[in-house]
Amino acid sequence: MKKTLPEDERKRIFGKNLEYLRNKRGIMQKDLAAELDLKPNSISNYENGKSFPSVPALLKISDYFNVSTEELLYDLNKDESMEVVKQHELFLKDVLDNMSEDELLDKYDFGDLFNELPLEQKKKVLNSIEVEYFKMNRNR
């Protein structure tokens, strides 16, 4: 169970995580605000710890960057939350580089439930991820 943090600390952590993701994507604050249909100064206020997003805004941000709200809200021991984002990006790069399903299965641990699937079902799951990723990027 996560320890409840003071509001100022929650704002700081969220702002740091948002700024990291925004810079990684290479998008300016005003452009991100426009993309998410937020007020022009919202992103700056979030990143500077002046305000905190509403739940609908938080969900928009989470969807835009393809991260969980937890990854946005928590500093999970030495930036573990951003490590998850980095691992996700590496996985997608491997998918885009046309790594075979067998190579992906050898390289990544997808968890116990996934590991219990027969090989053909595992390959179908990986193929689905690739298809959804391309659909998502085509719509941006």
Image: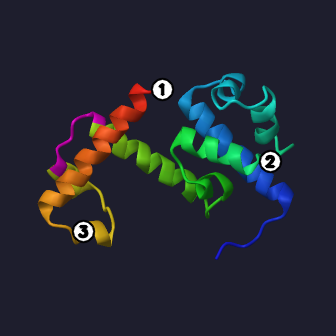
In what quadrant of the picture does the N terminus appear?
A: bottom right
Q: Is residue 122 left or right of residue 65?
A: left
Residue kind at label 1, given as amino acid type? Arg
Identify the mark nearer the N-term, 2 or 1.
2
Q: Which quadrant would residue 24 be assigned to in this image? A: top right
Label 3 sits on a secondary structure element that is helix
Identify the mark nearer the N-term, 2 or 3.
2
Can I make out residue 94 in this image?
no
Q: Name the residue located 36 percent from the left edge and 38 percent from the top edge.
A: 133
Q: Nearer the viewer, mark 2 or mark 1?
A: 1
Q: Pinpoint residue 5: horizontal percent, then vertical percent.
A: 79, 66
Identify the mark nearer the N-term, 1 or 3.
3
Can I make out residue 80 in this image?
yes
Task: Measure the alpha-carbon separation of dots 1 and 3.
Answer: 32 Å
Q: Which span of residues is magenta-colored?
A: 96-101
Question: Does residue 3 lie above or below 138 as drawn?
Answer: below
- Dots 1, 3 in contact, CB < 8 A: no
User: For mark 2, what is the residue?
Assistant: 52
In front of the other: 140 or 106: 140
Label 2 sits on a secondary structure element that is loop
Label 1 sits on a secondary structure element that is loop
Q: Which mark is residue 115?
A: 3
Q: Which mark is residue 140?
A: 1
